[in-house]
Amino acid sequence: MEKIRSISGLLSRKVLVAYYSKGGNTRTVAERLSKSLDTDLDEIKLGSTKGSTKVKFVKDPSEYDLVIVGTPVNGFKPSKPVTEYLMMNRGKFREIATYATYSLWPAGTLDKMTEFASKQPIASATFKSREIKLDQIDGKLSAYVESVKKRFKRTNSARVETSPIRGE
């Protein structure tokens, strides 16, 4: 049986960090996020079938209350595996947060992730590859973690307040 993870100990909610990493930077951020937020972790991998590329992942995002999706920037947009993951799972995300790692400029990567997921993220962030390699992302990562916690708590509070009471 899968362990239910919680954010900030307030509500037992299932949270997943799903990511694709080409050079290791997005993986580094994913692992640190997962540890900071005590989440499940799922690597999006390339899988090949004749004539097409399909992504592989283990966890079903519809089983999670929040999915944090990470991608490297590729040509000023999300990587193809993350684009495919978001489009394959469109409509399955209860809540989503996004982040991107980049070398030059993230441009409209986060906006494209929102478009592909058809879901407005509760939080978004970008992390520069050079700063990741030099282990200089503590402040930015902490701010992103706090933003996710705060906004996830708020969306869950709103959901609880507007939920009908059973038996009435």
Image (cartoon, rainbow, N blue to C red):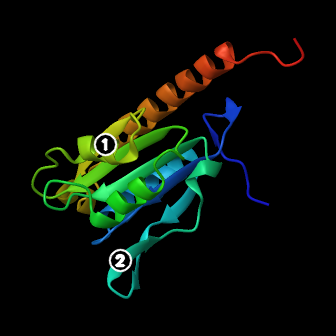
Residue 145, by quadrant, is top left
Residue 140 in sight: no
Residue 152 in sight: yes
Q: Left or right? Give the position of 95 relative to 38.
A: left
Instruction: Provide residue 20's location: percent of width, then percent of height.
Output: 37, 65
Q: How many marks?
A: 2
Q: Residues within 10 Å of mark 2 (few under 14, many from 20)?
A: few
* 4 or 46, nearer to the observer: 46
Residue 84, by quadrant, is bottom left
Instruction: Provide residue 155's location: percent of width, then percent of height.
Output: 54, 24
At label 1, which amino acid type do we have?
Answer: Glu
* 28 or 83, nearer to the observer: 83
Residue 23, by quadrant, is bottom left
Residue plotted at (80% across, 60% down): 1
Residue plotted at (65% across, 50% down): 63
Residues under labels 2 and 1: Cα distance? 21 Å
Q: Which residue is mark 1?
A: 115
Q: Which residue is mark 2?
A: 53
Instruction: Provide residue 124's location: percent of width, then percent of height.
Output: 34, 38
Residue plotted at (41% across, 85% down): 49
What SS does tag 1 mark? helix
Instruction: Provide residue 106's location: percent of width, then percent of height.
Output: 17, 49
What SS does tag 2 mark? strand
- In this rendering, the answer to whether 135 lies above or below 118 is below
- In this rendering, the answer to whether 70 lies above or below 80 is above
Which image quadrant: the C terminus?
top right
Q: Left or right? Give the position of 118 relative to 79.
A: right
